[in-house]
Image (cartoon, rainbow, N blue to C red):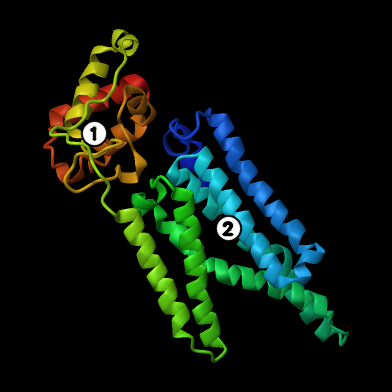
Amino acid sequence: GFALLIIVYYFAASAYLIDPSVMALSEGEAIARGLGLLAGGVLLYELACRSPLANYPKVFALALTALLVVATYLATHWFSGRGAYIHVGALIGSIMVANVWLNIMPAQRKMVDAVAAKQAVDPAWGAGAKLRSVHNNYLTLPILFIMISNHYPMTYQHPQNWLVLVAIMALSAWIRHFFNLRHVGKFSPAVLVSGMLGLLAVALWVSWPKPQPEVSVAPAAAVTETQTASMSALDTQVLALVETHCVGCHASTPTDNIFKVAPLGVKLDSWVDIERQGRQLVNRTTVTRDMPFLNKTNMTDEERAIIAAWGKEQGY
């Protein structure tokens, strides 16, 4: 998972991790913040587990919730929506893995060895492992959503995307509580129903139609006079192709009759955006050829060849 994070979000930070409309970061700055968020979050959690706070499970749960809320807020105010969500997921996943490697499995081995040697088992081994196991248990459903969140741009592109993720994590953990109760013989349908109604409310919130300006044609990608003067002939052709085939969906305010939010958070409103997403633009139109979606704008092979030539010129 960490290798994939590096390959996708760090090697292509300008396309997947950085969103200038959120915060203007260099690739190095964005990567440093991402690694800092992961390392800092895991370190804070581990220190808390080794502190007296571990003796108060309910208070610890509130502290862990606060940590994840702060991490979510910071990530969504530093990175693109996709990058933010995946970093919160990576933080949760790192905490869960560290719990198993650093405490749960070592504690189990100590207990097994003690029993084999007919020695007394230290209750602290089991208590520490149980605390972390409970945390891993409740974090299971939140991280499952984050794993597939890339398919739901209406969540990570929402103006309050941090609050959307916090709500989904809290509600999914609440639903997990229902199953935990059932496993000990307690059936509490109110927990499940309230959790499901909460998720339905979030779904309506993020999917509710937003007022759209009256636009009869797809918006044109913005280009400054300075950029126009420095653009090559291929640049100009690609700009025209993007305006014709792409910005109907991939814009801050899409005009497409199906997509009301830019798919995957990819916006091509300006030439700067086109250059930033250039590698992905070339790959999706000339390599995988799955864009435009269902080729609904009828991009021709000749037009794809122009984009391919531009990509070669750019070194993609």
Which residue matches tag 2?
92
How many residues crowd mark 2 within 10 Å: few (<14), some (14–19), many (20+)?
Answer: many
Residue 209, given in percent of the width and then of the height, sits at 26, 51
Q: Earlier in the sequence, mark 1 or mark 2?
A: 2
Q: Secondary structure at mark 2?
A: helix
Q: Secondary structure at mark 1?
A: loop
Which residue matches tag 1?
247
Residue 311, given in percent of the width and then of the height, sits at 31, 25
Q: Which residue is found at the position 51% from the left and 86% from the top?
A: 182
The amino acid sitting under disc 1 is Val
Q: Residue furthest bottom?
A: 185
Say whether residue 119 is visible: yes
Q: Which residue is found at the position 13% from the left and 37% from the top?
A: 297
Say whether residue 4 is visible: no
Q: Nearer the viewer, residue 115 or 275?
A: 275
Q: Which residue is found at the position 45% from the left and 40% from the top?
A: 80
Q: Which residue is found at the position 23% from the left and 33% from the top?
A: 247
Above/below status of 151 relative to 303: below
